Image (cartoon, rainbow, N blue to C red):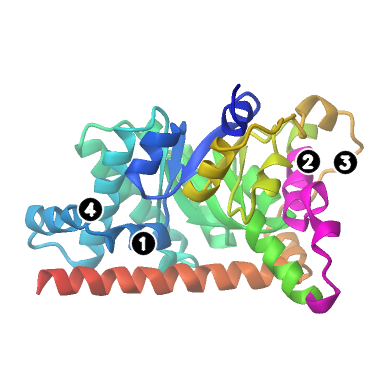
Amino acid sequence: MSNQLDELRKFTTVVADTGDFQSMREHRPTDATTNPSLILKAIQKDEYRPLLDQTIQDYPNASTSQTLDHLLVKFGEQILNIVPGRVSTEVDARLSFDTSATIERARHLIGLYEKEGISRDRILIKIASTWEGINAARILQNEGIKCNMTLLFSMAQAVACADANVQLISPFVGRIYDWYKKNAGSQWIEEDNAGVNDPGVQSVTRIFNYFKKHDIKTEIMGASFRNKGQIIALAGCDLLTISPELLANLAQSNEAVQPVLNAADSGKLDIEPIETNETAFRFMLNEDAMGTEKLAEGIRAFVADSIKLDRIIEQARA
């Protein structure tokens, strides 16, 4: 009998949300995603420390930021030896509000991959879904550099990304769920907000329906899951990026999985197009307290982990 992970693969492309190579080998995802927090977690394990040591040895005169980029690419190279598809590599979150610097860093990362003989078709450059980040992605996409827009919590961000013709967006299911649960406090009833009623699931569903209704080619990849129920409720989404723990939970379960999202059904819905200029984007995001707060919080968290990575690199060089 097949398990839930195998069943999910019939409807959705499974992606590993980790820097853990062993988990990828075990669960056989198509793609993999990384971010500063995941790389920080991995590099503190003994089995991954040699990657940092080798990076410093190979590039002794590189600055801390250059060393970090080389380290990200080394992780990406190893991941691409395991997965058949793509790896997502993130631009430093400290550049989230700087369009030109984001473009420069993205080009640099792609250049490092190409020097190693890795085609840009196998790389997704992750960029925070700020207005500046989306503008950077628009330019990069025109250069053939495919972008994965991360820290996405709202329809305003999703529609602006679609208008920029980005390759992929990553709406964060779990962090949306966290916000609504925290705000509800003692009024929160878990059973009433589970599965298709989960606010994070509902957010991705709205984006999915909008994109499919308007024949938008940008891929949708649900991310940041807190439990298996959120994943099962989004079966049928283009892609889902899943942590090792939840991949293991799915692999250990034989419960049935049925497609929940369906592009044909979405096409029958009555959904009006949404305006996508900068003024409309900023106002619509401002009206969304959850989206505004979680975007800012997410950038701060990634910046904090990038600073920790810098310190580890500097200590290793000492």
Q: Position of residue 295 (x, y in %)?
A: 60, 67
Q: Position of residue 221 (x, y in %)?
A: 60, 42
Mark 2: few/some/many CA within 10 Å (<14, 14-19, 20+): many
Mark 1: few/some/many CA within 10 Å (<14, 14-19, 20+): some
State which tag comes first along the sequence, 3 or 4: 4
Q: Tell me the kind of residue under disc 4.
A: Glu
State which tag comes first along the sequence, 3 or 1: 1
Q: Residue beneath label 3, please?
A: 271
Q: Residue beneath label 1, please?
A: 41
Q: Residue beneath label 2, please?
A: 210
Residue 195 highlighted magenta (yes or no): yes
Tell whether label 3 touches label 2 (CB within 8 Å): yes
State which tag comes first along the sequence, 1 or 4: 1
Residue 314 highlighted magenta (yes or no): no
Q: Which residues are magenta?
A: 185-210
**At 57% across and 33% down in the image, what residue appears?**
5
Q: Is residue 123 visible?
A: no
In 3D space, how far apart are the residues under numbered discs 4 and 2 (Cα atoms)? 43 Å
* 172 vs 191, nearest the viewer: 191
Q: Tell me the kind of residue under disc 3.
A: Ile
In 3D space, how far apart are the residues under numbered discs 1 and 4 (Cα atoms)? 12 Å
Q: Tell me the kind of residue under disc 2.
A: Tyr
Mark 3: few/some/many CA within 10 Å (<14, 14-19, 20+): some
Q: Is residue 206 visible?
A: yes
